[in-house]
Image: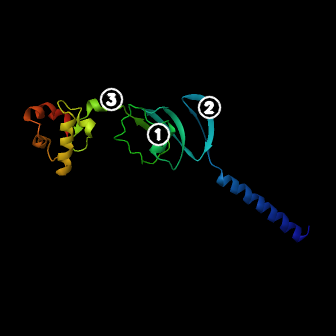
Amino acid sequence: MNKSKGKKIIIVTLVVAFIILGYLWQKDEKEYVSNENNPENTEVITSRFVIYIKGEVKNPGLYLIDKDKRINDAINLAGGFTDNANTKDINLAEKITDGMTITISSRAVDEYQSRISINNANLEELQKLPRIGPALAQRIIDYRNKNDGFKTIEEIMNISGISEAIFEQIKDDICL
């Protein structure tokens, strides 16, 4: 066997080996997941995380999502929030992690259990308080804007139209 023919065989073998190694290196691990709303629709997708979204979203279930996505993207993937979704404590910018469970709670349950912040509530939220109509709610907002917010809940009695009797009715329903 001549030396040039031997060198060609070695070079061809090395090239083939590098091609095979390159293919194996770039090959992503495949994941199989089905959406609980359509268990027959099983997909094979690469470079993604598996997450579970439940609660007040339109299409709860298991989803595959790109590794660089955020909770907002996951919510959109699940069809968005329902009308009853409580979104106030959700960090929509949080990055997704593999195996993550995202639970969207119900606004009805949270509203029953929580107080209304006189420093943050909007006009409609303030009107949920007993004896607080649109005019008083607007005065609360105007007062907090003028005074950089309330320092104590008792300070709400500085607003014209909110007497000590009204304060006694709402004090357990409000917070700063």
Question: Element type at marker 1?
Answer: helix
Distance CA(mark 3)–CA(mark 2): 33 Å
Q: Amino acid at mark 2?
A: Asn
123 sits left or right of 24 in the view: left
Label 1: how many Cα within 10 Å (few below 14, some 14–19, many 20+)? many
User: Which residue shows up at 26% across the image and 31% down it?
Assistant: 113
Numbered disc total = 3
Quadrant of res 165: top left
Q: Residue furthest bottom?
A: 3
Q: Is residue 89 visible?
A: yes
User: Which residue shows up at 80% across the image and 65% down it?
Assistant: 11
Q: Which residue is mark 2?
A: 41
Q: Which residue is mark 3?
A: 108
Q: Quick one: label 3 or label 2, which is nearer the N terminus?
A: 2
Distance CA(mark 3)–CA(mark 1): 19 Å
User: Which residue shows up at 87% across the image and 70% down it?
Assistant: 4
Question: Element type at marker 3?
Answer: helix
Residue 65 image offset from top left, x and y in percent: 54, 43
